[in-house]
């Protein structure tokens, strides 16, 4: 039996490579935090790595809730943002002080190109490290054809200001209309269950992270809004998830976010005078003991 096991484990990589299949053991190997690309992500983009860990947990919980493959969903969540390794300093989770963001020196169009390029960069890295095709799909599809709205809105505001100046005769240059395609991810929308789960986990983590001291109502309202928007724009229509499964995913996300954002007990700090009195009493006890 031992010899058979050794032969099977030794020979399995051959059919896996030929037929592009992966065993459960292989998926567990990809979940190892010491995988070279994950180690690189931890060092180059620690904020993104932390975000990916959160997405992994959300994805695993949702997969379990709908009876999907928990390990695959979690692994896809771990790797979905590896493309940010190339330009980590331009992503919010890696910027300690937003007031000195490098985007302050860029046009909205330039910022959008950098932000949206992390998808193609991630696909390229995944291929370089020979990751499974399902992981590559999750990377390529996790933003679907959504818009980098912050920079798109910034571009629209700039256009409106320049248009107003032109109409008032303050400038002779008529501004060009904003090209929305520059701010739009290339997609496609999620094509697998793992991609669908990861895409929603990514959106939920990013949005709820922005909430300050949220209540359960705040979290539920935000997550329900995200799901409503994604359903209405057809983001999940091709990934094979039913409306019932999507509803279970949503409740799983709400539960996980609430669990991970629980309020901690605020322990009272000793008053300065209390600390001084305690120190005096301790010295008296020490003196008595020595006597």
Image (cartoon, rainbow, N blue to C red):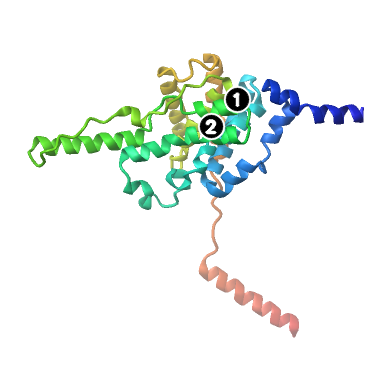
Vertical comparison of 47 with 151: above or below: below
Which residue is depicted at the point 31% across and 28% down? Answer: 180
Task: Find residue 154 and report its image quarter.
Answer: top left
Q: Would residue 22 be seen by someone viewing this image from the given angle?
A: no
User: Looking at the image, which residue sits at the far bottom?
Assistant: 291
Vertical comparison of 283 with 252: above or below: below
Q: x, y (%) of residue 74?
A: 62, 31
Foreground pick, 120 / 247:
120
Q: Is residue 229 left or right of residue 173?
A: right
Q: Count neighbours of disc 2 (C-alpha within 10 A) and say few if under 14, some if 14 to 19, many if 20 or more.
A: many
Q: Earlier in the sequence, mark 2 or mark 1?
A: 2
Q: x, y (%) of residue 235?
A: 45, 20
Tag 2 near tag 1, CB within 8 Å: no
Foreground pick, 228 / 122:
122
Provide the secondary structure element on which disc 1 rests.
helix
Q: Which mark is residue 2?
A: none
Residue tagged 1: 134
Q: Quadrant of the N terminus?
A: top right
Provide the secondary structure element on which disc 2 rests.
helix
Which residue is depicted at the point 64% across and 43% down? Answer: 36
Q: x, y (%) of residue 260?
A: 56, 39
Residue tagged 2: 123
Foreground pick, 57 / 167:
167
Task: Find residue 116 and report its image quarter.
Answer: top left
Which residue is depicted at the point 54% across and 48% down? Answer: 44
């Amino acid at each position: 039996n031992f010899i058979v096991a050794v032969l099977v484990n030794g020979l399995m990589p051959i059919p896996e490579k030929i037929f592009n299949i992966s065993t459960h053991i292989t998926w567990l190997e990809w979940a190892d935090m010491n995988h070279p690309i994950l180690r690189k992500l931890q060092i180059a983009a620690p904020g993104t790595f932390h975000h990916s860990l959160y997405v992994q947990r959300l994805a695993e919980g949702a997969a379990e809730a709908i009876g999907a493959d928990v390990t695959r969903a979690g692994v896809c969540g771990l790797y979905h943002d590896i493309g940010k390794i190339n330009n980590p300093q331009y992503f919010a989770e890696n910027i300690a002080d937003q007031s000195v963001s490098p985007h302050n020196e860029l046009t909205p169009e330039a910022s959008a190109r950098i932000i949206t390029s992390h998808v193609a960069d991630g696909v390229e890295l995944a291929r370089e490290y020979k990751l499974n095709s399902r992981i590559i799909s999750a990377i390529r599809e996790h933003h679907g054809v959504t818009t980098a709205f912050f920079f798109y809105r910034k571009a629209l505001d700039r256009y409106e200001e320049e248009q107003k100046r032109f109409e008032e005769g303050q400038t002779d240059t008529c501004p060009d209309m904003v090209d929305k395609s520059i701010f739009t991810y290339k997609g496609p929308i999620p094509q697998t269950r793992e991609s669908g789960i990861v895409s929603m986990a990514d959106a939920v983590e990013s949005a709820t992270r922005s909430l300050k001291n949220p209540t359960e109502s705040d979290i539920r309202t935000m997550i329900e809004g995200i799901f409503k928007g994604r359903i209405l724009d057809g983001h999940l229509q091709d990934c094979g998830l039913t409306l019932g499964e999507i509803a279970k995913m949503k409740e799983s996300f709400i539960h996980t976010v609430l669990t991970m954002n629980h309020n901690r007990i605020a322990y009272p700090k000793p008053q300065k005078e209390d600390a001084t009195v305690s120190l005096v009493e301790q010295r008296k006890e020490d003196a008595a003991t020595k006597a």
